Amino acid sequence: MFMESPIKRRKSRQIMVGNVPVGGDAPIAVQSMTNTETCDVSATVGQIERLQNAGADIVRVSVPSLDAAEAFREIKQKTSVPLVADIHFDYKIALKVAEYGVDCLRINPGNIGREDRVAAVIDAAKYHNIPIRIGVNAGSLEKDLQKKYGEPTPAALVESAMRHIDILNRHNFDNFKISLKASDVFMTVAAYRQIANQIDQPLHLGITEAGGFRSGAVKSAVGLGILLMDGIGDTIRISLAADPVEEVKVGYDLLKSLRLRTKGINFIACPSCSRQNFDVVNTMNELEGRLEDINTPLDVAIIGCVVNGPGEAKEADLGLTGGTPNNLVYVSGVPDHKLNNETLVDDLERLIRDKVLEKEKNQEAIIARS
């Protein structure tokens, strides 16, 4: 059964990215980024839809040229999830996508150019009521900061961010969020901890260039997990050299492990051993693949034997404990009936879907009464 997270989140002001609230008491948003060629409208729209189906609250799209800005216009018209335009070097691209209905502008202060160009972007954001994300990255710090610090450091990242926050403040613009990313976990954590005490804007978390699927997921979980445990973070992206849909899945798994989001099934499963009475690994692989469409929160325990099985199953919405000759199913913490191995996965899928349907109907009844 879902328990409230003991984490006390940092108080931040709230902004809106499209229809998604970021900061304040809003749920921590999960973001990803397309890796298709933006000018390939069909491919980009298709990927955005897959990301949205996986649960992405916000999707970032790189817009590296004015031609890409024209493609973005069409992409925006064909999608419904809030879109952030990733802008580097040419501020005119930001002005163009602002006209085309972008939901947020992400600019890198290290390469956007002179203050008058940043000011033009701010004016466009004001006019169209679009938030800005100031994206500071250890790999693209301003040249004078590189010279001052000799190498990227937490202090350098924070100084870069504060420098550009000052610009926004001078233009009376407070509709923004901040990110300070590095590929090094320690640097990233230290930078976010420093700036969290200096501003009240929402913070977008990420370990940039984290690595491939496995190593990047681990590095991101460590770095972001530390910050989230501190209560820092209003939106996250897991940066992986992998299918961006996996970024969304890992993001939700991270938030679910900290009880900060409850989307979809939370599986409690043993790693399996010689005591198992059914094939736990293959059962889990099958169930995860079949049940990716479920968004309703549900705790499901899949335990291979009777050592820890009953205890875990009693705490879950639905639980399975391996047994001989048959496996015992717990429903809402109570032993209910047994299943044999021959049709185990099919039976479990049916039971889980029935439990989800029951939970959804109960929720609808509660809403109707209120």
Image (tube, rainbow, N blue to C red):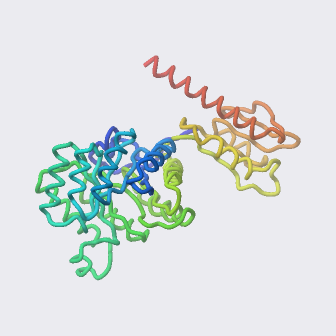
Q: Where does residue 283 sit, x and y in percent of width and height?
A: 73, 47
Give the quadrant of residue 106.
bottom left
> Relative to 344, is 144 on the left or the right?
left
Residue furthest out toward the top: 369
Question: Relative to residue 208, is residue 362 depicted above or below?
Answer: above
Whole-percent x, y for residue 244 in the image: 49, 54
Nearer-the-camera pick, 18 or 96: 96
Which residue is pictured at 24% across the width and 81% down the height? Answer: 147
- Marks counted in the figure total 0
Q: Is residue 323 above or below residue 369?
A: below
Q: Residue 326 versus residue 166: which sits nearer the camera?
A: 166
What residue is shown at x 42% (from left), y 71% (from top)?
A: 184
Which residue appears at 65% of the width and 46% of the height?
A: 289
**Coordinates of residue 138 in the picture (x, y in percent):** 34, 71
Front in this rendered view, residue 189 or 22: 22
Tell me: residue 26, above or below residue 332. Answer: below
**Which residue is painted at 63% across and 40% down in the image?**
291
The image shows residue 318 at horizontal and vertical percentages of 67, 36
The quadrant the N terminus occupies is top right
The quadrant in which the C terminus is found is: top left
Asked if residue 166 is positioned above or below residue 268 in the image, the reply reads: below
